[in-house]
Every structure is written in C-alpha cells, then in structure tokens.
Image (cartoon, rainbow, N blue to C red):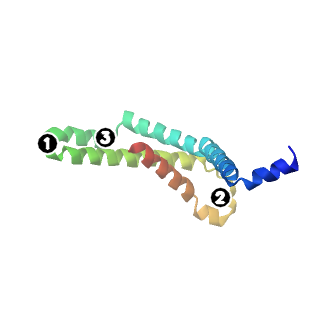
Amino acid sequence: MSLYEVTQMLQDKSKIRNDMEEAANLIKNMFYERYLQKIEEEVEYQRLQVKNNRPKEIELLYALKPFIPHEKYVMVDKLAESIMVMKTIAGLQAEIDKSIHKDGVYDIDTNCLADKKNNFANAALLFALCCKVN
C-alpha cells in the first residue's frame, strides 16, 4: 500500500469511524470473554445452587402459602426470591473470600487490607446477578 493510498484512507471519516467502532467492539468482546462472562457463569452457578438447595426459610414461606389469602401469594414469592438473591450473594462473597490469600498484597498494603472485600468485584458481581435474576 502506498503512502498516497494511506492518506486517502485517512481522509475518509466514515472509514476511520468504522475502524474505531471495530476496535472498540474487539476490546469490549475481549473484556467480556475474559472477565464478565466468567463472573456471569459464577453468578449463575451460585444461583442454581441456591435454587436446587432451597434454604429452610424459603421452604417455610412456601409451606405457609396455603394458609394465607391468595392475593398475598405474590408477596410470599417476592420475599422468597429476595432470600434466594441474598443467599446467592452470600455464596459469591464466600467465593471471593476464598480467593484472597493470606500471603498476598492484602497483608502487606494496609490500605488494601482495609478494603479486603474488593468493592469493584462486589459491584461487578451484583451487576451480573441483577442482569441474570430478572
């Protein structure tokens, strides 16, 4: 490709815009595949664990359903779903806690030690959970 052809391509704003969009999509897809997809998979795994092994509190709520007015069933279902979401988050937090090693940076840097729960990871997990639960 000659220098003339390159300068002609650089003058075409739509070509540059398309190239920039393609580059942005490549970065977005790479980030999703490396990080967010794994988080979504873990959220789904934890959600299924809770769903398949429902806590006693949820079983109790469902056992009470026949004894309450029919119009209150939605409230019981929402409460049960809230408990399942909280249990899912607790399972995810336990996985995060297991991944923090005692001999890592967190033990050396007092600022990191104070923020041992990694707020960015928690926010990402909550975001992924909210997207999957609905």
| Marks 1 and 3, how far apart at CA | 22 Å
Rendered residue at 57%/41% (across/down): 38
**Residue 64: quarter of image:** top left
Kind of residue indicated by mark 1: His
**Residue 63: quarter of image:** top left
Left or right position of 1 against 29: right
Residue hosting label 2:
106
Residue extending farthest top: 52
Q: Nearer the viewer, mark 2 or mark 1?
A: 1
Residue 119: numbered disc:
none
Q: What element carries label 1?
A: helix
Q: Which of marks 1 and 3 is nearer the N terminus?
A: 3
| Marks 2 and 1, how far apart at CA | 52 Å
Query: Horizontal and vertical percent for residue 60?
Result: 24, 41
Residue hosting label 3:
56
* Residue 118 seen anywhere in this rendered image of the structure: no
Q: What element carries label 2?
A: helix
Rendered residue at 87%/46% (across/down): 2
Around disc 2, counting alpha carbons within 10 Å, would you say few (fewer than 14), some (14 to 19), or many (20 or more)? some
**Residue 65: quarter of image:** top left
Instruction: Work out which quarter of the rendered image holds the C terminus and state it.
Output: top left
Instruction: Work out which quarter of the rendered image holds the N terminus and state it.
Output: top right
Around disc 1, counting alpha carbons within 10 Å, would you say few (fewer than 14), some (14 to 19), or many (20 or more)? few
Q: Is mark 3 on a helix, strand or loop?
A: helix
Q: Which of marks 2 and 3 is nearer the N terminus?
A: 3
Query: Horizontal and vertical percent for residue 51?
Result: 37, 36
Left or right position of 15 against 90: right
Residue hosting label 1:
70
Kind of residue indicated by mark 2: Tyr
